[in-house]
Image (cartoon, grey):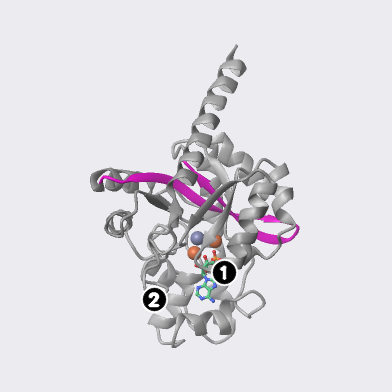
Amino acid sequence: MFADLHLHSHFSDGTFTPEEVADRARRCGLGAAALTDHDTVEGGARFLKACSEEGIEGVLGAELTAEEDDTEVHILGYFLDPTHARLSTELAACQQTRQDRIRQMAAKLNDLGIPLRAEAVFELAQCQSPGRPHVARALVTRGHCRSLDEAFQRFLRMGRPAWVPKRRMSAAFAIDLIHDAGGVAVMAHPALTRKDSLIPKLADFGLDGLECWHTKHTAAQTDRYLAQANECRLLITGGSDCHGMSKGRPLIGSVRLPWHYYEELKEAAARRKAANLVDQAAAKS
Ligand code: AMP
Ligand code: FE
Ligand code: FE
Ligand code: ZN
């Protein structure tokens, strides 16, 4: 049995519904799947219901946008409590700044002579957590660019004229927030972050795991991260980072995490939840 622990839906920049993600996860033979939309858990309840109907294990997760040493780092949270008050407040703030950022990007595009309205992006995105991929799709749909890649290369990549930085929580804050919400915290795709010195640092902050398998990791990189996870006593995870049809063929199931790693992650989350209950009881007495 295998798990794919990094999947996006249309609640952020994926194209599938949570039900489609669950259906495809079962059809490609996965025993467990995690929905990890950017800065939101909105699709989580539907995803868990769909997974149980499909007869597979669903994990409610999120991919938090964080930073350390001026570097953007994505922290995956797994087995989150979606009703947790502090988590809800923080995610709402992230979503608000994402929406403000879309308006700023539209304004920059307008200054460049491209008449794209923020409302057109929101209409297309239909989600609370919009991002650059939605701007790119709007630019293509409206004929301003021929492809998503062109939209990123010309306008949206870091340093390009319509790029706007995101407000990011610190990595330590993200890890603590995930723990507070009963979850386990995993550093996403370290090879894309390209700053391995962050791994021991985040481990000191309480990081639980490292995403060693990822679509964009080479076999050599995966081996290196497996070794580094062992050195830093981190759990080992993996996921395809499937965004649906937005990046050509759906990637779901192309990364298959061996089951015992998934079980260890699940056990860590159970320990976290038990520890949180003890802390809450102590705080009350
Ligand atoms: P944002 O969260 O708004 O900064 O957008 C980041 C997302 O954009 C990533 O999660 C990817 O899904 C997507 N992305 C980044 N670079 C590219 C690219 N060159 N082409 C297509 N999608 C990209
Ligand atoms: Fe994405
Ligand atoms: Fe990411
Ligand atoms: Zn992702």
Q: Main secondary structure of the magenta part?
A: strand
Q: 223 or 251: nearer the eye? A: 223
Quadrant in which the C terminus is drawn: top right
Q: Amino acid at mark 2?
A: Gly
Q: Residues within 10 Å of mark 1 (few under 14, many from 20)?
A: few
* Residue underneath mark 1: 218
Q: Point out the residue furthest to the top here.
A: 285
Q: 48 or 195: nearer the eye? A: 195
Q: Position of residue 192 (x, y in %)?
A: 61, 66
Residue 243 in view of the camera: yes
* Residue underneath mark 2: 248
- The structure residue drawn at horizontal position 43% and vertical position 57%, both measured from the top left corner, is 256
Q: Residues within 10 Å of mark 2 (few under 14, many from 20)?
A: few
Instruction: Look at discs 1 and 2 and give the one toward the viewer.
Output: 1
> Residue 2, relative to residue 189: is it above or below?
above
Give the SS element for disc 1.
loop
Q: Is residue 69 magenta?
A: yes
> Residue 82, relative to residue 93: is it above or below?
above
Q: How many marks?
A: 2
Magenta part of the protein: which range?
Answer: 55-79
Q: Position of residue 137 (x, y in %)?
A: 43, 76
What is the distance, in whole Å, between disc 1 and disc 2 at their CAs?
20 Å
> What label sits on residue 118 in the rendered view?
none
Closer to the N terminus: mark 1 or mark 2?
1
> Residue 217, relative to residue 268: is it above or below?
below
Whether residue 228 sits left or right of residue 54 in the image: it is right
Q: Position of residue 224 (x, y in %)?
A: 65, 60
